[in-house]
Amino acid sequence: MSDFEKKILDYKNKLNTTKDLEEVESIRAEIFGKNGFINLEFKKMGLLSVEEKKNIASNINKAKQELLEIFKIKSSEALDKDLNEKIKKEKIDVTLPEHEFKVGKVHPVSQVIDEISCIFSEIGFTVEEGPDVESEYNNFTALNTPENHPAKDMHDTFYLDENMKTLLRTHTSPVQVRTMLKGKPPFKIIAPGRTYRSDSDQTHTPMFHQLEGLHIDKDITMGHLKGCLNYFIKEFFEVEKIKMRFRPSHFPFTEPSAEVDIGYRVEKNKIIIGEGDQWLEILGCGMVHPNVLKNCKVDPKKYQGFAFGIGIDRLAMLKYGINDLRSFFDCDYRWLNHYGFDPLDVPTNYRGLSK
Ligand code: PHE
């Protein structure tokens, strides 16, 4: 066996015993690299006769082909092995708890909407929705709002056409109309959603959130309204006792109408809800006006009930100590990270709303 043949045999043996991709590649460089075995063998032929050159070159080429064949197989074997190891290492155990994958936070407004829906669903309210773009009729006329009512003023309402027939709803009350027109009494619904008014300062933003409530049945009275709101506010602020005051007010779609304040005091820069002698307005309410019932094909001689409209953002500010309403809608990730809620911590009645 010539030295050349011995060397080739060595390489073949070495290759056959390895399964490691790195080693295969290093052997490949040793043989086929610029100064590798094959090139050196070709260089050695320089001084030989033509006949000898032919012979040796054909030997080298034969060996080269054989080795290339082996490399092909070895590389793919080693690649498979590498891949299998990688897959094994990266295998995800889907039964592991997921708390390492928390991303993002739930916005306080979404959290409060979930909390409120929980509270009202406990006493039999279902959730309705209506569109942000409303007709003038549903937003005002059906709700017994006269042609010259100040709420219809261009300064407050965002109209979407020249004829002032389409607008961005200024409150969630049009959902009362939609609900009553599409069904039959009794009705017991809440409707959270976005509302719009042309207004902007520390406690007003052009877009804000309201929650409408409507309960229509045969014997519903103002007493039910008071009981319902008292229950809601206690549950929402997670307190035992609440100081609540009904102030006479006016809305075209309710008669009588009231605004509700809750008592609070400030202690060390913190708002304590339910005690103290300061008052904060949080909602408007009243007994649904007979004209509204008539407009919605409900017989006011048989049915009556109450409605209320709560400012959701205001509730969120109070409960979670946020003092500028505008910051809710800045889309500042740092703010959301601070005030936001864990997406896995869904509010429930039995486990607690926010704790
Ligand atoms: N829609 C009223 C507002 O936006 C609130 C309200 C709703 C009052 C239902 C009474 C009954 O101010």
Image: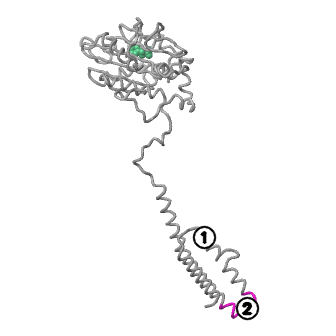
Q: Find ligand 1 in the image and state its quadrant.
A: top left
Nearest the eye: 289 or 343 = 343
**Bounds of the magenta span?**
45-55
Q: Residue 294 versus residue 67: which sits nearer the camera?
A: 67
Q: Position of residue 167 (x, y in %)?
A: 47, 22
Residue found 42% across the figure and 51% down from its top: 93
311 relative position to 52: left or right: left
Q: Relative to residue 47, is residue 345 depicted above or below?
A: above
| Residue at the (62%, 88%) spot, across then down | 59
Kindly check if marks 1 and 2 are in contact, taking CB atoms under 8 A apart as contact: no
Packing grade of label 2 (10 A; few <14, some 14-19, many >=20) is few
The residue under label 2 is: 48
Q: Is mark 1 within 8 Å of ligand 1?
A: no
Q: Is residue 55 left or right of residue 318?
A: right
Q: Quadrant of residue 12?
A: bottom right
Residue 179 image offset from top left, x and y in percent: 33, 23
Q: Amino acid at mark 1?
A: Glu
Residue at numbered disc 1: 25
**The furthest residue to the right:** 47
